[in-house]
């Protein structure tokens, strides 16, 4: 009887850990947005590539009103600059 009780507790704890891992993995995946189809991302890629080609470091400091646009631009810039 004690063995079954210990085994059940172990199974419940393993299940709880597995559920926690699944939940944290899905949250992290949702945080990585796909900006690649946005205009600001494409602009960032172009300007990052241009700065890379001319050996410049972030020559144009763009500021966007929306935080999502700023993130998309920066992600594109990093991609275009080769970082």
Image (cartoon, rainbow, N blue to C red):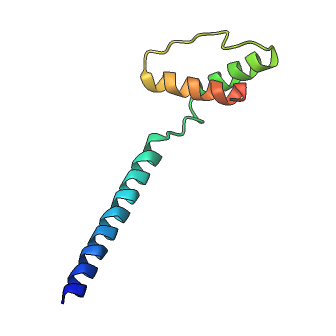
Residue extending farthest left: 1
Q: Locate the N terminus by quadrant.
A: bottom left
Q: Residue at x 70, y 27 (%)?
A: 80
Q: Residue at x 50, y 26 (%)?
A: 71
**Total number of numbered discs in the rendering:** 0
The spot of residue 39 in percent (x, y) is 58, 26
Q: Residue at x 64, y 22 (%)?
A: 43
Is residue 45 among the parts visible in the rendering? Answer: yes
In the image: residue 27, left or right of residue 57:
left
Q: Locate the C terminus by quadrant.
A: top right
Query: Toward which corner of the image does residue 16 lie, by quadrant?
Result: bottom left
In the image: residue 13, left or right of residue 31:
left
Query: Toward which corner of the image does residue 74 lie, by quadrant?
Result: top right
Up/down of 57 relative to 22, above or below: above
Up/down of 21 relative to 80, above or below: below
In the image: residue 50, left or right of residue 28:
right
Residue extending farthest front: 2
Is residue 42 among the parts visible in the rendering? Answer: no
The spot of residue 19 in percent (x, y) is 34, 62
Q: Residue at x 56, y 31 (%)?
A: 38
Along the line of sight, the residue nearer the viewer: 36 or 79 = 79
The spot of residue 60 in percent (x, y) is 64, 10
Along the line of sight, the residue nearer the viewer: 34 or 4 = 4
């Amino acid at each position: 009887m004690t063995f079954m009780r210990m085994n059940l507790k172990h199974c419940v704890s393993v299940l709880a850990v597995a559920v926690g891992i699944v939940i944290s993995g899905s949250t992290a995946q949702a945080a990585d947005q796909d900006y690649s189809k946005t205009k600001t991302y494409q602009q960032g890629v172009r300007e990052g590539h241009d700065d890379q080609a001319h050996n410049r470091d972030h020559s144009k400091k763009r500021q966007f009103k929306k935080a999502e646009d700023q993130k998309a631009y920066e992600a594109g810039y990093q991609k275009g600059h080769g970082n």
